[in-house]
Image: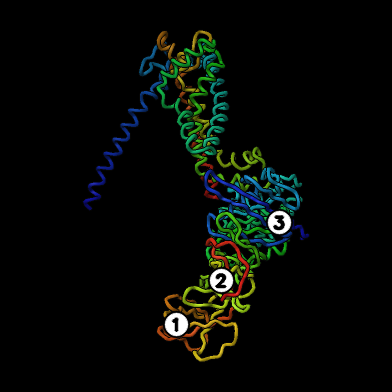
Amino acid sequence: MAEHGVGLSLKGLTKAYGPSVALDGVDLEIAPGEFMTFLGPSGSGKTTTLNLIAGFVEPDTGSIDVGGAPIVGVPPHKRDIGVVFQQYLLFPHMKVGANVAFPLRRRGVAKREAQRRVMEMLEVVGLEGMAQRYPRQLSGGQQQRVALARALVFNPKLLLLDEPLGALDRRLRESLQLEIRRIHREVGVTFIFVTHDQEEALAMSDRIAVFNKGAIEQVGTGETLYQRPDTLFVARFLGDSNVIEGEVRVDGGQTYLVDGRNRFMAPNVNVPVLDAHMAVVVRPECVRLVAGAQELGPGVNRVAGAITEVTFFGSRRRLSVDVDGRAFLVDESGLGPAPRPGDAAVLAWRAEDASLVCTGAPTGAPRSAVPVG
Amino acid sequence: MTTNAWRRPSRLILAAYCTLVGLFVLVPTLIVVPLSFSSVRSLQFPPPGWSTKWYEEFFTNPEWRDAALTSLRVAGVVTVLATALGTMAAIALVNSHRRWSAAARAFLVAPMIVPGVVIAVGIYYVFLRWQLTETFLGFVMAHTVLAIPIVVITVGASLQSFDLQLVRAAQSLGAGPLTTFRTVTFPLILPGVLAGALFAFLTSFDESIVSLFLSGSTMRTLPIEIFQSVTTSLDPTIAAASTVLLGLTTMTLLAFGFLSYLRNKAEAHG
């Protein structure tokens, strides 16, 4: 099929329902053909943004451009944007074939041509031979495939997917995730996928926009968001992490985070704001157990504590380690002898493997970095 | 064993009781059927002989025929008007703010609750001034007001099981508001609309209280013609007219029952 992805540009979108602010200034550029995921907890504004793009709701302020053309004020049926809903929303009084043909008939496509395209699209979603069934005769996964075919058959400029896998069980969800990825590659349409499931977002997306409290916290590839989160919210929403909050110091070209008792080396990537209250985020798999006397080299943090819990997950083992009353999570390979709760442990991680992030707490006025003492 | 022994007579008693109640309700109504085939000019039971001359009288006498035609015409127009208006009202109610829709619903359904004679007096007073008594338009307007509530209720019940999100789905696929109504909403609420239309027809066709006030020598409906004849002539044409009325309403209800039977069957198969 031809490439017909179209870019999308959101600028300064706001929306309030009475006193409650649903969206508080959303800006985002989506490239043609991209698979973009809106990720966030419920009430974070991701579905509101989707409804604004679809045209079900109009923004209070801001603009939405699809392929360079503004669409605010255009009614939804004239936007040429496909939508897949969590509850499938197939028309129960129409057979599968008629459901998929519905958008073509609205566009005056001739009957035979429509028939051909319906069959073609049913094949893409793996439902050939189902055209004469009624939606209620299909399983949930099959119904969602029909919804996908119906939303794609008219070559929409964009496809919006509003938690489309939320109503399905885990196994089916995983197989449909792969399926949706494959269909995205095949049709080349720009996909916007809304979910609150971080694993789903990481597995499927080209890029992820993390929503929080009506605004986008960070946009980037899954790897960027996971390895280099900008904010504590992003770090906590995507995967597990060890978080140390404290004040930023700089000493001899090395950035430190001081939390009162301890001083940790932090990565030097972001230009730190001196004395700012920030946090260091270390993923559990970046922390290792080391022998107490081992020479670690420069740029490695080391703390000592005692193991409190060991959980075996097959391919890996998760240790919970108490360090001065703070619980550290450590992931290590499931191979080799397992440590036991109560064992003393020395933990180490390279400063460069951690991220220095904003905590969201108010910080003082930015000052230039000045070496301490 | 004891439960069975206890059960059997109690079931018999229940069956007998139900039959008696049924007869008590039906017999006074059904007695008009043999009376209408009587051979003599009096409401004598049992009739001394049989004939169909009272039906001939009913269908040829201009007074009876006019009344019957008036009733049918009024009921026909009322069915169309009340179904259209009631359906639109029911859809507006589910789409509007909850606080307003509750008040609006109460207002729309009021003609069902307010005593008929109060409505009749009110309508009579207003229609006298507007010179709408004894007019086709007057009957249609009054009956439509009385028939709208039943349509609002039946269509409202259908809309309860209609997922309003389907409207969004249709819009996203390129259907404007009217197309969405025609292709999605209407087919799915059709059972409620049909039931509403049927009851709207019956409401108008049977209506007696308001019609009594609006009727006169130049225009009256069938129930009023029957009422007038009972007070003056008492010949079996009344029984024939009543039988026709009874037959028509029963057939409409049976047709509706048959339709819903067919639909259930289609759904079970589908």
- Callouts 1 and 3 on one subunit: yes
Q: Which residue is mark 3?
A: A119
> Farthest residue in the left direction?
B2
Marks 2 and 3 belong to one chain: yes
Q: Residue at x 61, y 68 (%)?
A: A225
Q: Chain of mark 3?
A: A
> Dot 1: within a 10 Å radius of its alpha carbon, few (fewer than 14), some, or many (20 or more) residues?
some
Q: Residues within 10 Å of mark 3 (few under 14, many from 20)?
A: many
Query: Residue flagged by tag 3: what amino acid is it?
Result: Met
Which mark lies nearer to you, 1 or 3? Answer: 1
Mark closest to the chain's N terminus, 1 or 3: 3
Does residue B237 appear in the picture of this structure? no
Pinpoint residue A199: horizontal percent, then vertical percent: 57, 67
- The disc labelled 2 sits on which kind of residue? Val
Q: Amino acid at mark 1?
A: Gly
**Mark 2 residue element:** strand
Q: Which label belongs to residue A248?
A: 2
- Residue A369 position, x and y percent, is 62, 70
The residue under the point 61% across, 72% down is: A370
| Whole-percent x, y for residue A85 in the image | 59, 53
Q: Are marks 1 and 3 in contact (CB under 8 Å)?
A: no
Which of the two residues, A309 or A283, is positioned nearer the viewer here? A283
Q: Earlier in the sequence, mark 2 or mark 3?
A: 3
Q: Is residue A225 above or below residue A10?
A: below
Which one is nearer the viewer's eye here, A342 or A92? A342
Q: Residue at x 43, y 83 (%)?
A: A306
Q: Mark 1 or mark 2, which is nearer to you? A: 2
| Labels 1 and 2 within one chain | yes
> Of the residues under marks 1 and 2, which one precedes in the sequence?
2
Q: Tell me the number on the disc at residue A305.
A: 1
- Determine the chain carrying the residue at label 2: A
Mark 2 or 3: the one toward you: 2
